[in-house]
Amino acid sequence: MEDKISINCQSSIRIDENKVIYFDPFKIEEERRDADLIFITHDHFDHLDISSIEKIMKDDTIIIIPLSIKDKVNFKNIITVSPNNTYNIDGLSVKTVSSYNKNKDFHKKENNYVGYLITINNKVIYVSGDTDFIDELKDIKCDIALIPIGGTYTMDYLEASKFINYIKPKVVIPTHYKTIVGTLEDGIKFKELLDNNIKCILLIK
C-alpha cells in the first residue's frame, strides 16, 4: 500500500489505490482533474489551498472538511466532519480524530480540526493533520501513519518519534518539513529514533 502514497510537498498527500484520494493538496502546479476524494484537515494556507483543489477536482469529487471551516469553501459535494466520529464516505470507512497543539496557539483544540483514519484494502492509514502528541491519539491503531515532524507549528522530529514508537504502526511517512519549517535532516533524525520494527519511508526529498 505504501507504494501507492506520494507527497507533493508539506502535507500534500496523494493515495492512488482504487480511488484517487488527496489530503491537504498544496502547491499543485498542473491540472490533473483526477481526485475522487479530497480530505482537508484544517484551514491554514498550506492545508486549505483553493487553487490546488480546483486543479485536481472533477465534477463529482467529494470534498471532506471539518465542520468548523465550512464557511471557507464554496464547492459542491461537501461533507462536513467533526473529531471523534466514524463515517462511511463513498464506500470508505473514515474515522476522525482530534488534531491540535498542547502549548501553542497555532491549532487550538476548540477549533475542532481533524486527523483522518481511512481504511483501504483492509489497511488503516492515519493522516494526522497539524498536531502534537496529544492524549486523544494514544489509542490510535493503524498500519500506515503520516505525521508532521517539522516543529514550530507541530511536533518536531523528537516528539514525533516518541508518538510513533508509542502507537507502533507498521509504516510511518513523515510530513510537514522542508517546505516552510524543518529541514531534510529532520527526516533522517526522525528515522534514526524509531524502533527497529517500524518501517520509515522518507518521501520528501
Image (cartoon, rainbow, N blue to C red):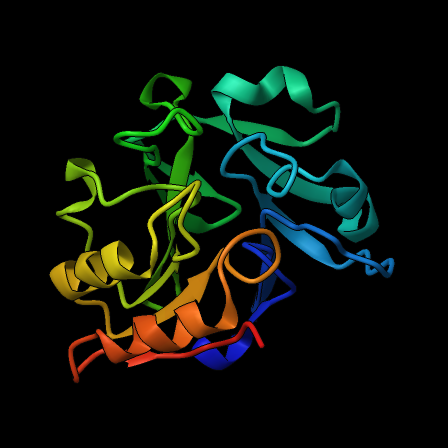
| In the image: residue 115, left or right of residue 57 | left
The location of residue 105, given as percent across then percent down, is: 39, 24
| Viewer-proximal residue among 181 and 100 | 181
Q: Quadrant of the C terminus?
A: bottom right
Q: Residue at position x 63%, y 43% from top?
A: 46
Query: As displayed, is residue 198 above or below residue 157?
Result: below
| In the image: residue 26, left or right of residue 147 | right
Q: Residue at position x 65%, y 50% from top?
A: 25
Residue 113, quarter of the rendered image: top left
Query: As displayed, is residue 64 above or below residue 151?
Result: above
The location of residue 53, given as percent across then percent down, is: 74, 44
The location of residue 48, given as percent across then percent down, is: 64, 37
| Viewer-proximal residue among 28 and 119 | 28
| In the image: residue 127, left or right of residue 158 | right
Q: Residue furthest bottom?
A: 196
The location of residue 125, given as percent across then percent down, is: 37, 60
Q: Residue furthest right?
A: 31
Residue 1, quarter of the rendered image: bottom left
Number of marks in the image? 0
Query: As displayed, is residue 198 above or below residue 132?
Result: below
Q: Residue at position x 27%, y 29% from top?
A: 103
| In the image: residue 119, left or right of residue 91 | left
Residue 114, quarter of the rendered image: top left
Q: Residue at position x 16%, y 65% from top?
A: 165
